[in-house]
Image (spheres, rainbow, N blue to C red):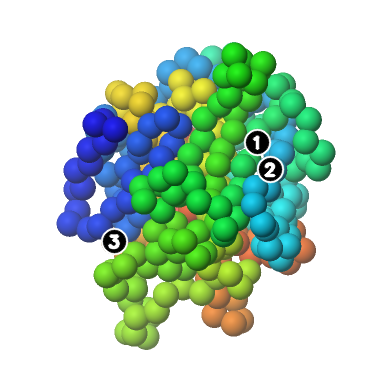
Amino acid sequence: MDKFSCHVFLLLPFFCFHLGLSWSCLNTLSNQAVNCGGSPDPGKLEYHMGPVLASPLKLYIIWYGNWNQIHQHTIRDFLNSLSSPAPRPSVAEWWSTVMLYADQTGSNVTVTSHQKPLPLDPRNGLYLVLTSADVLVDEFCRAVCAFHYFTFPATVGVIVPYAWIGYSGTQCPGMCAYPFAMPAGMPPPPSADGGNTIMRPPNGDVGVDGMISVIAHELAETASNPLVNAWYAGNDPTAPGEIADLCQGVYGSGAGGTYVGQVSTDASGNGYNVNGVKGRRFMVQWVWNPVKKRCFGPNAMD
Ligand SMILES: *[C@@H]1O[C@H](CO)[C@@H](O)[C@H](O)[C@H]1NC(C)=O
């Protein structure tokens, strides 16, 4: 795509994720959105008159490929955590920032619930297509970790929003499982004791724990910009800076450079920033809060 051009503010490596039919360029190592094509400016997040996903959201998962059941449990527990109480800071609190987005009908993004059967649900459905380690997807690991878009009536009969996220544990953890893996050639972030350490994943798998943050990113953006005509920054709808794009690489207060911000570690030293069901812990990136006008998450210090 010739639209694909990025200019990075900081002299740091950056990644570009594929969102919608568009390239969105993200600097995972900075709390600054990168200047990309349409120059999304975090301060200029704007509403473009389209709908948000405002009727109670039902998440349907399409497991594509040969899935590891342990990984499936982890992902299901994360999705169930979006609408379930858990100790603070929780996954459900994280989602409450996304629920601040409303559309011109005055309807806000709503709570999500994870559904088991797989009907075509044009009223409430949001479909997650999750591909396993053995599935190769065009552009996955070359330039993209995930994208979201919607179906067309001519092919599916209805418009339903969907997001695809690939399991990156074996194919490209350094690109898509940040901060549990680092891009090739990039030193791990400095630790408190002066050494270099890569953060360890809270559920024991670099690929699935990294994927959960990418799932969270796509869910937040699909809910607030499902038809790519609601909430985004920048003037170019084919390269939107959506609410999670603006906070790529930010997981806690003070994030910047290779520092993910202030997060917690469990007794075994694994990193996390939110709690979920069944005592689970997850690491999810922050999203843009339209009221505070900054990146925000439930583990924020201020
Ligand atoms: C709905 O969105 C508006 C506008 O951002 C916000 O002020 C309000 O708190 C939101 N409601 C809920 C329940 O999040």
- Marks 2 and 1: CB-CB under 8 Å? yes
What residue occupies the far right of the structure in this picture?
Answer: 117
Cα–Cα span, label 2 and label 3: 35 Å
What type is the residue that disc 2 sits on? Ile
Q: Secondary structure at mark 2?
A: strand
Q: Is residue 256 left or right of 244 when viewed as pictured?
A: left
Say which mark, if any, is on residue 89. Answer: none
Cα–Cα span, label 2 and label 1: 7 Å
The answer to whether residue 82 is above or below residue 271 is above
Give the class, few, some or many, for how many residues have Cα within 10 Å of label 2's Cα (few <14, many ≥20). Answer: few
Q: Is residue 46 left or right of 213 when viewed as pictured?
A: left
Horizontal and vertical percent position of residue 285? 48, 53
Q: Secondary structure at mark 1?
A: strand
Q: Hey, which quadrant is residue 53 in on the image?
A: top right
Q: Nearer the viewer, mark 2 or mark 1?
A: 2
Residue to which mark 3 is pinned: 257
Say which mark, if any, is on residue 127. Answer: 1
Residue to which mark 2 is pinned: 62
